[in-house]
Image: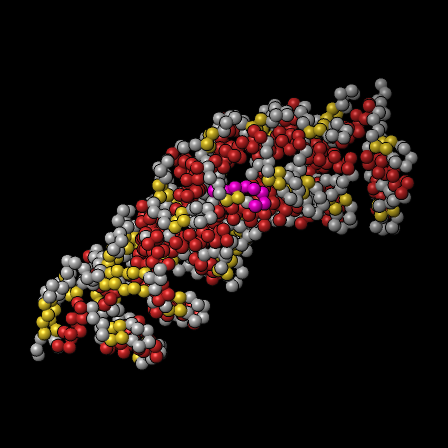
Amino acid sequence: MRLWRIRSSHSSSTLSTQARLFVHQRLHTGERPYCCGKCGETFNQSDHLRIHQRIHRGEKPYHCQQCGQTFVRSDHLTVHQRIHTGEKPYHCQQCGKTFSHSGPLKIHQRIHTGEKPYHCQQCGKTFSDPSNFKIVFDEHMKRSHGDLYGRLLRSGKIQVETGLLPYIAASSQEPVRASPEPVQKTSQITADKARRHCCEQCGKTFRQSSSLKRHQRIHTGEKLYHCQQCGKTFSDPSNFEVHRRLHTGERMYCCGKCGETFTKSADLKKHQRIHTGEKLYHCQQCGKTFSHAGSLKTHQRIHTGEKPYHCQQCGKTFNQYDHLKSHQRIHTGEKPYHCQQCGKTFSHAGSLNIHQRTHTGEKPYQCQQCGKTFIDPSHFKGHQRLHTGERPYCCGKCGKTFKLSDHLKSHQRIHTGEKPYHCQQCGKTFSRSGSLKVHQRIHTGERPYHCQQCGKTFNQSNALKIHQRIHTGEKAYHCQECGKTFSHSGPLKIHQRIHTGEKPYHCQQCGKTFSHSGPLKIHQRIHTGEKPYHCQQCGKTFKTSNHLNIHQRLDSRESQDHTQCGKIFKTSAYLKIHQRIHTGEKLYHCQQCGKTFSDPSHFEVHRRLHTGERMYCCGKCGETFNKSGDLKKHQRIHTGEKPHHCQQCGKAFKKSVELKIHQRIHTGEKLYHCKQCGKTFNTSAQLKIHQRIHTGEKPYHCQQCGQTFGRSDHLTVHQRIHTGEKPYHCQQCGKTFSRSDNLKIHQRSHTGEKPYHCRQCGKTFKISTYLNIHQRIHTGEKPYQCQKCGKTFSDPSQFKVHRRLHTGERPYCCGKCGETFNQSEHLKIHQRIHTGEKPYHCQQCGKTFSRSGSLKSHQRIHKGEKPYHCQPVAEPERS
């Protein structure tokens, strides 16, 4: 074959035919002899003209067998078929990246070589990509040479000057320049011609036909590009390529200053403006500047109020398309971005990037004033406002200002009551997504934040930061009034309310006020009955997490050991309170009576004695209590619940303390000793009450009559005399009582139960007091002595009645006739005269009596019993 060689100052190439030589020479001469009759465009080859004419005729003779798409040129079909086959025959020798056709490979290789062959004649700026050169150059002219671009645009002509493309020499196979002096190729095009491709549906115009095709897919919904890994489809190949890098982790664009890498060149350019501080785009209304055009367009919607993006499910509108996409993932639950290290998923890439810095420790954002560094740019902006004092976000209802827009949105939900975030497991709603995430960790048990020193884990980063101050000893927050220091600001604010007396949190149901929100939430659960904390082992529920933790320690037998007496406790707080018994320390002082306490809970209960506060109310009978424990015990009266059982005799009790005291009957244990008389008791409370006999102390006062009592329960029972309250009902006969023990004794009249036995004679009694009095018959003990006549008694009630003989006191008065009595039983018997009541029946003859003694005497008639004998008197001996 004869080879034709051409040599010139521009190039040196070898060609196989003379025709190819002629065509090649036109590159150097600029000759374009083939002209389109319709649009006037010229070509240097006839084949190129034929292909071009198919655009006017609409002819597309090449069809794809798989998807049916048609093409003007056969090489376009070949490149398209590689989408279906996945073939990428062109390889980069340096990084191994593959491409489906040669053009992108050449452009890619310029990243490694740094070659930028396209020059702006005005400022010398260079460009590497020929396919986007017209677009890039046009944008460059607008930004850097606005005045010149305006003149050219007004004149109807825009001159685009490009450098000469490099050619490949067949002999040396090395890239060479055609000439040291680039050949200037000048084309005059009008502004209309620059954007000659128009969409027929919406009228939008494009500079390139490929851009128009991509745009038309928005109207047709066609998405040709499929991701093999996740199945997502795309209409734009560039978007598909960026998405593919999410799966491969490829980040080919690197910042030369900080080393950060990006999946898109545009993201790298935007990032580089952080280092240069360049902000080319200006808002005409407020003068604010931006580093890229998209940010300016989004910003301008703040002034116009435009929100063009609508959510089809909830109707919410957005001023950015990305915000709409992120919002839609709330409805779909989609989280396409995965962390390769911990597997955590995210709904958008930005959150993943910020999260990955948690693993790398990277903090690229540094405050120039204090040197503090940040992972998240939004946190960095918020921090800078601490120095500037800027609070640009204002609430339209109450006027409160905020440093961050997210804080304003969260605040506005207080006014609207909106809680858009729902827990899928328990249905609880939250006004903030962060609160939902933290709440979900209760169900999952996740505690992702670890202390490096002690290994303790936390479900919130703030809790970890506060905990770390225990190791560092840092207490940066000081109270100005008392000088007390705190490790974080929250406890300082709550502490300051002690000085101010402020209680800003109110219960809507009972009106009680609190100094901080936590106790209010716990208090509200009293009204709602909510118990959100569940034990995974036994299913028991609790109102607070602390109660759950204590319960779990009980199951796992985890306890705090005290070295002095060996007593064990469920929590360290209980151990500290117990240790004050040994040290005698009493930190809590009552301002009214001066009494001191070692336990804060005891002090709080004592304080309510002075204030009269009784915040716990029974929903059935309305009785109020100053302790929640007392309310629970009281409610068991209505429900009849007795959850505590004795293993020895099977007896059930409403309170665990009652069970412990009962068990001492079986063991005979009496731990508490009176130092004055040596008497022993089962409980410390009984010892304290007993000691008041020696001291004469009666700390409980009746507000109505002034009577004092040594025990609080005696005062409560006494007050029912004034109120007439009788809360205890007999289910069988309906009789009511002011005391529960009286009800128990009464119920034994129906059941015939007499649980107390005399060990000497076997006699049984309904109540223990009767047994104690009876046992004195055997022992001869008579502990009650009259100070006036010296007579002694074994029964305290008889002693009281006897004393009234000396005093003349007759406290019980008949309401009808006014007669008075010194015993309540005598009054009851007397009142039956007026009422005619005769409650005692003879089982044999049916006769009724008003007194039990009369019934007993009558029954002896039927039995023939005569228990009383006359003893003969012995006559004196006669001397």
Q: Quadrant of the N terminus?
A: bottom left
Q: Is residue 112 visible?
A: no
| Depth check, front residue: 527 or 466 | 466
The answer to whether residue 720 is left or right of residue 600 is: right
Q: Main secondary structure of the magenta part?
A: loop
| Depth check, front residue: 859 or 284 | 284
- Residue 30 found in image quarter: bottom left
* Residue at image coords 56%, 32%: 497
- Residue 216 found in image quarter: bottom left
* Residue at image coords 34%, 69%: 209
Residue 124 x %, y %: 24, 53
For the magenta stretch, what is the residue range? 396-403
Where is 537 relative to 370, above or below?
Answer: below
Q: Is residue 791 visible?
A: yes
Is residue 499 rendered magenta in the image?
no
Q: Residue furthest front?
A: 155
Where is 701 relative to 517, above or below?
Answer: above
- Residue 56 found in image quarter: bottom left
The answer to whether residue 828 is left or right of residue 509 is: right
